[in-house]
Structure formats: structure tokens, C-alpha cells
Image (cartoon, rainbow, N blue to C red):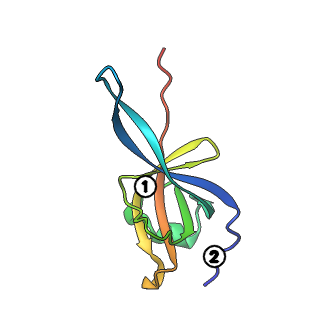
Amino acid sequence: MSFGKMDQRIQIIKTVNRKDSAGFVTKQDEVLANVRTYKEEKNATEKWVNLATFSSATCLFRLRVIPNLKVTTEMVILSENDRYQIISVENVRNRGMYLEVLTTKVEVSADG
């Protein structure tokens, strides 16, 4: 199985609640990992047609399994200043070597 070049740098983050010294709770991004990955945007290939069950998926990331980190749908991927919500994580061929992560791009609305 060919995974192409893993030349895209990403950050896997989780949003956590932090309490400041005044007792106010704020949400902050906590970086869990900085890794290289293969990134593929949604296109009209047969593979993407077969992923119809995840029709909201707009981007696929393939990365090596990260020791001591279980990637879940509660996490977010940051890639080239874009934010992607994880909607599916699959262990490729159940070998524990690579993960295939389906994501949807999070659009940031401009508050006027």
C-alpha cells in the first residue's frame, strides 16, 4: 500500500478549559502532537465516491501512529492555518502503523 509522501506538517490539538487566576474559565488549544502527514483534499476519484457514508468529509490525512496518543473525534487538526474537525479515525489494515483520519474543514465566521 502506497501512502505517498508525508510532507505536510500538522498539529493535533484538543480544546481544554483552563481557569485563570481570577477564576474565569477560558477555552485554550493544547497541542498534543506535531507530525508529518499525507494530506488529500476531497475530489471525484473512486476512493472518495466509496467514502459516501462520510459525505461531510472534505479532507483525508494519513499519518503514522503516535506512541502514547489515541487520536479521537474530540481532537482537531491544524494544517496551514486551516482547522479540521476529525470525524473518523481508522487504523489502516489493523497493523498499528498508520492512521487514516477523515476530517471536515471548520469555516470561521467573521463577526461583524
Q: Please tell me which residue is depicted at 35% across the width and 34% down the height of the picture.
A: 18
The answer to which quarter of the image holds residue 60 is bottom right
Measured in 3D between alpha carbons, the distance from the residue under mark 2 to the one under mark 1, in whole angstroms, is: 19 Å
Q: What amino acid is at disc 1?
A: Ile
Give x and y (percent) for residue 58.
51, 54
The vertical placement of 12 against 27, above or below, is below
Residue 76 in the image, given as x and y percentages of width and height? 45, 50
Q: Is residue 46 left or right of residue 88?
A: right
**Element on which disc 2 rests:** loop
The residue labelled by disc 2 is 3
Q: Residue at coordinates 41% horizontally, 66% vertically from top-left?
A: 89
The amino acid at mark 2 is: Phe
Residue 67: x %, y % from top left: 48, 71
Residue at x 47% of width, y 55% of height: 103
Mark 2, Cα crowd under 10 Å, few <14 / some 14-19 / many 20+, is few
Question: Where the N terminus falls, by quadrant?
Answer: bottom right
Among the 4 quarters of the image, the one containing residue 2: bottom right
* Residue that badge 1 annotates: 86
Local SS, label 1:
strand
74 vs 38: above or below: above
Question: Quick one: which residue is furthest to the left in this view?
Answer: 23
Number of numbered discs: 2
For residue 94, which numbered disc appears in the image?
Answer: none
N-terminal of the pair, mark 2 or mark 1, is 2
Q: Are marks 2 and 1 in contact (CB under 8 Å)?
A: no
